[in-house]
Amino acid sequence: MTQIYTDQVSVASLVTNTIYASGTVGAILIVAGLLLADAGTVRRRNLLNSMAEKFIGFFIGALLYYIVGFALWASQFYIMQGGTLGDAIADWWLGGSLMRARAQHVSPEVFPALNDFQIFVFFLACFAGIINVLLHFSVSERMKPAAYFICAAVASVVSSALSALTWGPVGLLTNPGFHDFFGVGFVYLFTAGMGVTFAYLLGPRPGMFAPNPQVSSYLAPQPALAVTGVALIFAGLPMVILSCLFFFQPGEEPALMAVSITMADTSVGLAFNNYMLGWTGGAITGAIIAYVTKKYAYVLLGPLSGYVAGAAAYDIYSPLQTLIVCAIAPLVSYLIYEFTQKRQIDEHKLIPLFLGGGVYGLLVVGIVKAGTPRGGYFGITEGAYAFQHATVSFGMQLVGVIVCMGLGVVTALILWPILSATVGVKNGDAPQIEGLDKHFWDIEPDVPTYDGAPAAHKR
């Protein structure tokens, strides 16, 4: 009979298994929320095609993550213990020994808490897919499907490698001091770097900034769906918070202590309350901006910007610090968004949320929480990976922002000429005006759309 290692499947291990499994549920709710937000804001003639491309892009990201992405992220722990990237790939690629193992048959001396790590593959695979959904927001209606799917595959691999550097306790940037609780860098800033570069190179959609007799406007057709989508994202993210924590048993007693993914001191309750206050601060300021400017988009951009700005430090901020930091974020998003709109850059989500709230949020952590101990790994008392040996600093936050955004920009700039010379990049004006649902799927909208005189564009 095959030996059973009860430590791998104890009741205590089931508790952490359940905690991390809840994060996968939260991630799936986020996907649903993003798809609903898309359904509420994309031009009706392109709705089916836009949803289909996002849906396929999500699963391309998930597949690539199973093939190699998780091995790239997990390599930071192997290197900490004297192993190599090759060792991580051998264990954690899609056919790897630990990917296919039954936890109860693997000695804890070989790999402790195996079930937790296997569940984490699912969790992070969802975010590899979410990165592609977010990327599509910036190229929707303009990029050819084949080009987008290739970009999705590349983004999945590159962002996975970036996550090994910038998200976790012992990555090349996180171990010395870069602090990012929620993965703002490798999820949001990397995607924004790619997306904004593509948006600039693709140019605006017909009728977006200049009058077009065949496209009346780009007003959201179903704002209620967008609101529902944002509410689903709000509902899903608390479960993701739980998966951004490590749980250790500090002594002989059957107790679990939480530390953040960066090994900073935190607690579940603190992170949850900070999350709520991040949305609240952003929502109040966003509502003020919306009513003053008469631009309804800030009703939703406000709370989202507040969330993104606080996400890097929900584990270490005090509640009051979170509220203040996140209440300022929509103002930053507003200034950056209006600046890019005046320059007719046709991107309406990643710029205000990630280039605005995300960059601001990562940098302000280095000011507000400078000197906070973090990094290393629990239980290691000396050496390069000693528990909490490093501290938060503005310099490391700045380096992280530059690396995450810069890698996104570079990835897009490398892909652009390759795609241009092969499958092509841009849908022409004619298919965009006619509607991509008609062009690709021979489907007309279920209700008539107005194609009369041009109307002013306002979001």
Image (cartoon, grey):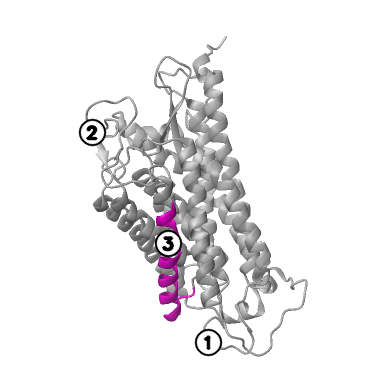
Residue at position x 29%, y 31% in the image: 387
**Would you name the residue on which mark 1 appears?**
210
Which label sits in the foreground, 3 or 1? 3
Along the viewing direction, whichever of 260 and 170 lies nearer the viewer: 260
Q: Give the residue number, with chain letter if any, for mark 2.
A: 384
Which residue occupies the extreme front position in the image? 320
Q: Nearer the viewer, residue 201 or 234?
A: 234
Q: CA distance from mark 3 to mark 2?
A: 35 Å
Q: Which residues are magenta?
A: 323-346
Left or right of 136, for residue 359: left
Give the side of residue 386 with respect to residue 73, left or right. left
Q: In x, y percent, where is residue 205?
A: 54, 78
Residue 100 visible in the current orientation? yes
Q: Which residue is mark 3?
A: 329
Most foreground residue, 71 or 458: 458
Gap between marks 1 and 2 measured at Cα: 56 Å
The magenta stretch spans residue 326: yes
Question: Residue flagged by tag 2: what amino acid is it?
Answer: Ala
Residue 234 x/y as whole percent: 57, 51
